[in-house]
Amino acid sequence: FSLTSFSQFFSSQSVLLTISFNSNKTDFSNPSTFILLGIPGLEAAHFWISIPFCAMYAIAILGNFTILFIVKREPSLHRPMYYFLCMLAVTDLVLSTSILPKTLSIFWFNSREINFSACLTQMYFVHCFSVMESGIFVAMALDRYVAICHPLRHSTILTNHVVAEISLSMVLRSGMLSLPFPFLARSWPYCTINIIPQSYCEHIAVVKLACADIRISSYYGLFVVFSVIGLDVSFIAVSYTQILRAIFSLPTKDARIKTFGTCGSHLCVILAFYIPCLFSFLTHRFGHNVPLHFHVLMANVYLLVPPMLNPIIYGVRTKQIRDRLLRLFIHKDI
C-alpha cells in the first residue's frame, strides 16, 4: 500500500460516509410506509403477549355486541342509561378494533409495515374514540347522579331530547378535537427513519420522526389531554361525590352497601381508562427514564382493558340486563 493509494482510499471512504450521512438527513413530505415495532424489547415474548391481548379483545367483542343486542331487543331498556351504555359499547368496539388486528399481525406474522394514510386514519380513530369514551363516562356519571340524587325527576330531566343533545355534543367534541392530529402529522416533513417504537400510530410517536420543530403538535396534544381529562374527571368527581353523599344518607345498611359497591366498580373502570391514558401521554413528553416496553404496554392497556371491563361492570352486573340475558338463554334451552 503506497502513500498515494492510501490517500485515495481514505478520500473515497470519506465521500461514502458523507453521502450516507446526507441521505439519512434527506426529507420527504409523505413517507409511503411506517414500521411498527410492536413492543420493543419484548419481541421474543410477542406470541405470549398476544394471548391475553386476544382474550381481552374476544371478551370485548362478545360482551359489547351482547349489550347492543339485548338493549335493542328489549323495549323496556330504551332509557337514557342504556342509550349511553350502547354508545359506550360502540365506542369500545371501534377503539379496540382500531388497534388490535394490526397489533396481532405484528405479533403473529411479523407484519410491521403500515401505509402512511392508514397510519393517519388509525391515529384519528384512536384519539377520536378515546375522547368520545371520556365524554360517555361523563354522561353516565350524570345519569347516575340524577338517578340516585333526584330519582323522582330523572325522567323529566333526562328526556330523549336531552339525551340526543348530549350524545351529539360528545360526538362533535371528539371529532373536532381529534381532527387536527392527522392534519398536523401530515404537514411535517419526515426523515428517512420511519420506525415507530409502538404497536399502533399514536400522534406524538409519529410526529417525533419529523425533521421539523413539532412544538405545535406537542402543545396541541397537551391541550387536548388536559382540557378533556381535566374537565371530564372534574365533572365525574363532583358527580360521584354527590352520589356518595346520597348513598350514606340511605336508611338501610344493605342499600348503602349495594349502591356503594355498584358505584365503586364504576369508578374502578373509569380509573382503568384515565390513569394509563394520562400515563401514556405524559410519558411521551416527560418520562424519558420509563422503560419503553412498559410505556407501550400501558399505551395498549387503556385501549384494551376498559372495552373488556365495561360490558361486565356496566352490563352483566346491571340487574335488568342480567335478567334479560338469563331469560334469553332459558328460552333457547326450552
Image (cartoon, grey):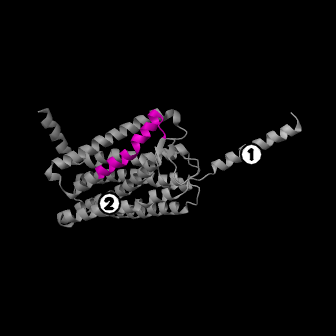
Look at the image and say whether residue 64 sits in the magenta stretch. no
Decide which of 63, 176 is in the foreground and name it: 176
**Disc 2 element:** helix
Q: Who's the residue at 24% across and 62% down the image?
A: 164
> Mostly what secondary structure, the magenta segment?
helix
Q: CA distance from mark 1 to mark 2?
A: 56 Å
Decide which of 9, 314 is in the foreground and name it: 9
Q: Residue flagged by tag 1: what amino acid is it?
A: Val
Q: Magenta residues?
A: 88-112
Q: Which residue is mark 1?
A: 15
Q: Who's the residue at 14% across and 52% down the image?
A: 76
Q: Residue flagged by tag 2: what amino acid is it?
A: Val
Q: Which mark is residue 171?
A: 2
Look at the image and say whether residue 90 sits in the magenta stretch. yes
Decide which of 264, 89 is in the foreground and name it: 89
Q: Is 104 located above or below residue 299 in the figure? A: above
The 10 Å Cα crowd at callout 1, few under 14, some 14 to 19, many 20 or more, is: few
Q: Is 51 located above or below residue 297 in the figure? A: above
> How far from the left and from the top, in percent, is residue 228?
40, 62
Q: Are marks 1 and 2 in contact (CB under 8 Å)?
A: no
Q: Which of the two discs, 1 and 2, labels the residue nearer the N terminus?
A: 1
> How far from the left and from the top, in percent, is residue 185?
49, 56
Q: Nearer the viewer, mark 1 or mark 2?
A: 1
Image quadrant where residue 263 sits = bottom left
